[in-house]
């Protein structure tokens, strides 16, 4: 408690002479002058500077951690500049020595994210692109730009014994990509999606045989292996407008394409299936390990680097552009249609996992009846997978 007292009887002066003291003041003074009090003073004088120093060091350490970890839980890459979260490269192994990947369409929306992931895990990457669907250049990748998959001379040259750069895998994403445009210009889609894919597969076939023949003549040179696998982008457009009873769609669902785009993607899968048959048939004669193939049917992909100004861009990027501009969002129909939207970084991870999946890994064999090529024990394989979330999103108007 506080005690207020005055030594002057004059009311006008009592506040001037006011003495404020604690009722326990005398006991505190007694303690401080005691032996224990003196020891406490010494302890405070010794430990207080240490506490202050610890706090300063601790604050500096925290500040340093924050300043040098602006990416939170993101993990720095082996190559390149893309910092990725652990979920974004989950189950994607680090590159083995000399693993090198050719990716067509690597400057595009999906392809550029695949390039980031491959570089992050330490792969050597070569991008082949004509820049028709993107300009997402990556200085950490080797570029063959602007090169066209429909022109055989634009595909990578074959190796000589002097080259140290060769290919172990191929990702084929280059394509004409609009359903609407394909209705008005089917010739373009036939040329790029079908004939261009045919050129890429022929190049792989010839590349493997060149490697086998050329390096067998140079026994003193470490022989690069043939291309193990090619993964190519197909599309859910091949299902067309399926019967609701078939939902969620499985890979065995019948073809129902409604556009030249869908037709060329489906026929690309046919090319890949025949390519694997040929690889298995000629492998023993050419002493070349056959190349496996995987077609991935993408559903509605959305995410960063999708250009909303492109008239053929996905609906999510268009919605975001309109919302950010405080403009009305247009939804065709009654808004009750359903779509399966899948995030682009999930698609990139699916592509790389499919590419690196080894033959002895446990995989879903429910679609093997269409993909088996029964020509020996060490066969290449062809597989088709949907890349989706199996979740419906309804765009309702209110």
Image: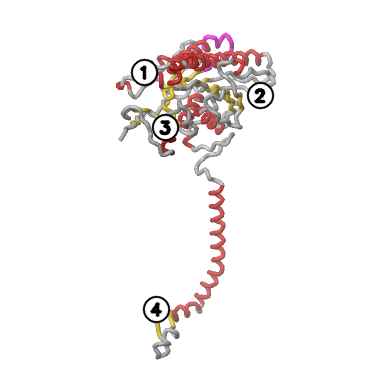
- Choose between 156 and 170: the one closer to the eye: 156
Nearer to us: label 1 or label 2: 1
Residue at mark 4 to residue at mark 3: CA–CA distance: 69 Å
Query: Where is mark 3, residue-wise?
Result: 316
- Choose between 258 and 142: the one closer to the eye: 258
Nearer to us: label 1 or label 3: 3
Sooner in the amino-acid sequence: mark 4 or mark 1: 4
Q: Is mark 4 on a helix, strand or loop?
A: strand
Query: Where is mark 4, residue-wise?
Result: 2
Image side of residue 78 versus residue 89, left or right = right
Residue 177 coordinates in the image, percent (x, y): 47, 22
Image side of residue 8 versus residue 56, left or right = left
Query: What is the quadrant of the N terminus in the image?
Result: bottom left
**Circle 3 residues within 10 Å: few <14, some 14–19, many ≥20:** some
Answer whether labels 1 and 2 touch (C-beta < 8 Å).
no
Residue 386, picture quadrant: top left
The image shows residue 67, relative to residue 380, as above or below, that is below
Q: Is mark 3 on a helix, strand or loop?
A: helix
Nearer to us: label 4 or label 2: 4
Query: Where is mark 1, residue-wise?
Result: 253
Residue range of the region highlighted in magenta in the rendering = 280-291
Nearer to us: label 2 or label 3: 3
Residue 251, picture quadrant: top left
- Choose between 308 and 247: the one closer to the eye: 308
Sooner in the amino-acid sequence: mark 1 or mark 3: 1
């Amino acid at each position: 408690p506080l005690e207020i007292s005055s030594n002057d009887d004059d009311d006008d002066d009592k506040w001037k002479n006011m003495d404020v003291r604690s009722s326990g003041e005398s006991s505190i003074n007694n303690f401080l002058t005691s032996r224990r009090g003196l020891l406490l003073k010494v302890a405070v004088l010794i430990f207080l500077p240490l506490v202050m120093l610890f706090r300063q060091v601790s604050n500096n350490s925290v500040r340093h951690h924050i300043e040098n970890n602006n990416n939170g839980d993101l993990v720095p890459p082996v190559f390149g500049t893309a910092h990725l979260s652990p979920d974004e490269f989950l189950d994607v192994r680090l590159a083995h020595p000399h693993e090198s990947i050719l990716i067509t369409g690597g400057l595009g929306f999906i392809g550029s994210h695949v390039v980031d992931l491959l570089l992050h895990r330490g792969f050597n990457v070569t991008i082949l692109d004509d820049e028709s669907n993107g300009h997402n250049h990556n200085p950490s990748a080797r570029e063959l730009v602007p090169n066209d998959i429909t022109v055989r001379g634009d595909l990578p040259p074959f190796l000589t014994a002097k080259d140290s750069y060769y290919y172990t895998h191929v990702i084929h994403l280059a394509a004409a990509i609009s359903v609407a445009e394909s209705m008005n210009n089917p010739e373009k889609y036939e040329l790029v999606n079908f004939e261009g894919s045919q050129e890429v597969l022929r190049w792989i076939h010839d590349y493997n045989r060149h490697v086998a023949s050329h390096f067998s003549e140079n026994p003193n040179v470490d022989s690069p292996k043939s291309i193990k696998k090619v993964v190519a982008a197909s599309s859910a457009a091949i299902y067309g407008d399926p019967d609701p009873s078939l939902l969620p769609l499985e890979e065995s669902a019948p073809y129902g394409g409604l556009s030249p785009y869908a037709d060329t993607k489906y026929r690309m899968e046919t090319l890949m299936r025949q390519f694997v048959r040929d690889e298995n048939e000629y492998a023993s004669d050419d002493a070349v390990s056959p190349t496996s193939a995987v077609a991935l049917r993408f559903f509605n992909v959305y995410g960063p680097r999708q250009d909303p100004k492109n008239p053929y861009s996905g609906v999510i990027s268009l919605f975001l552009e309109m919302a950010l501009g405080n403009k009305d969002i247009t939804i065709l129909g009654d808004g009750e249609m359903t779509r399966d939207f899948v995030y682009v970084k999930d698609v990139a991870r699916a592509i790389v996992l499919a590419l690196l999946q080894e033959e002895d890994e446990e995989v879903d064999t429910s679609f093997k009846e269409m993909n088996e090529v029964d020509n020996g024990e060490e066969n290449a394989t062809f597989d088709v997978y949907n890349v989706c979330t199996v979740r419906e999103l309804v765009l309702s108007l209110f």
